[in-house]
Image: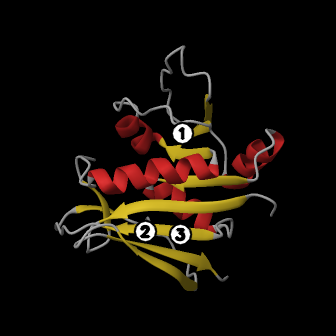
Amino acid sequence: MSVNVAIYMHVSINGMIARLDNSDFSSELARSDFLKMIKRYKVNVIGRNTFNMASKSNDFPLDGFNIVVTSHKIKLKKEWKNVIMANKKPKEIIKIIESNGYKSAMVAGGKLATSFLKEGLVNELYINVEPIAFGKGIPIFANEKFEKRLELLQVKKFSKNEVRLHYRVLN
């Protein structure tokens, strides 16, 4: 695989990436870190739910090449020239990224990240652990059958309560 694929997620202490209503709980520091990381990777691959949340922000579309993976019809604003819709499988998304000359991509969103990880396309994981716990929510990875071994590369402390874990995917 010639494209370096990283997953980037904000999670609660109990592994949730969103509340059931998809409302955001990540801190300003974590969101700022995400924006810095996406500039480094240059390609942002997100699913429909992440798109719906991100498109409400003034930061969207992010600098670089944005791919929204969905089977649903979503209306893009005309000024969003660097955003494409793709109803494709992860390996086909990688081909789109390669054909546009990119060597790395950041994937965000639970179901989408799970599909990339399950297919063995992910090299790195960035997990920002937020100081919050809630009972019902959307888990970091969809309930799929897979197992991956990881190697911890770095722990970065954002504040006295927030950390980012950086892992390499070993298998």
Question: Looking at the figure, which quarter contains the C terminus?
Answer: bottom right
User: Would you place residue 143 above or below residue 98 in this image?
Assistant: below
In the rendered image, which residue does mark 1 sit on? 70
Mark 2 or mark 1, which is nearer the start of the sequence? 1
Which of the pair 142/45 is nearer the observer?
A: 45
Q: Mark 3, mark 1: which one is toward the viewer?
A: 3
**Number of numbered callouts drawn:** 3
Q: Residue at x 35, y 39 (%)?
A: 53
| Residue kind at label 1, given as amino acid type | Thr
- Where residue 14 sits: x, y (%)? 26, 74
Which mark is first along the chain, 1 or 3? 1
Q: Which element type, helix, strand or loop, lies under badge 3?
A: strand
- Using residue 41 as the reference point, say whether residue 154 is left or right of it: left
Vertical placement of residue 138 versus 168, above or below: above
Q: Are marks 2 and 3 in contact (CB under 8 Å)?
A: yes
Secondary structure of the residue carrying tag 1 is: loop
Residue 92 image offset from top left, x and y in percent:
74, 48
Q: Position of residue 13 (x, y in %)?
A: 26, 74
Q: Is residue 59 above or below residue 125?
A: above
Q: Residues within 10 Å of mark 3 (few under 14, many from 20)?
A: many
Residue 125: mark in rendering: 3
Q: What residue is at 52 percent from the left and 45 percent from the top?
A: 46
Q: For the residues marked 3 and 1, what is the alpha-carbon distance in whole angstroms? A: 22 Å
Q: Check residue 127 in the rendering and tell me which mark sits there, or answer none.
A: 2
Q: Position of residue 143 (x, y in %)?
A: 43, 69
Q: Residue furthest top?
A: 78
At mark 2, the secondary structure is strand
Question: Of the residues shown, which amino acid type is indicated by label 2?
Answer: Ile
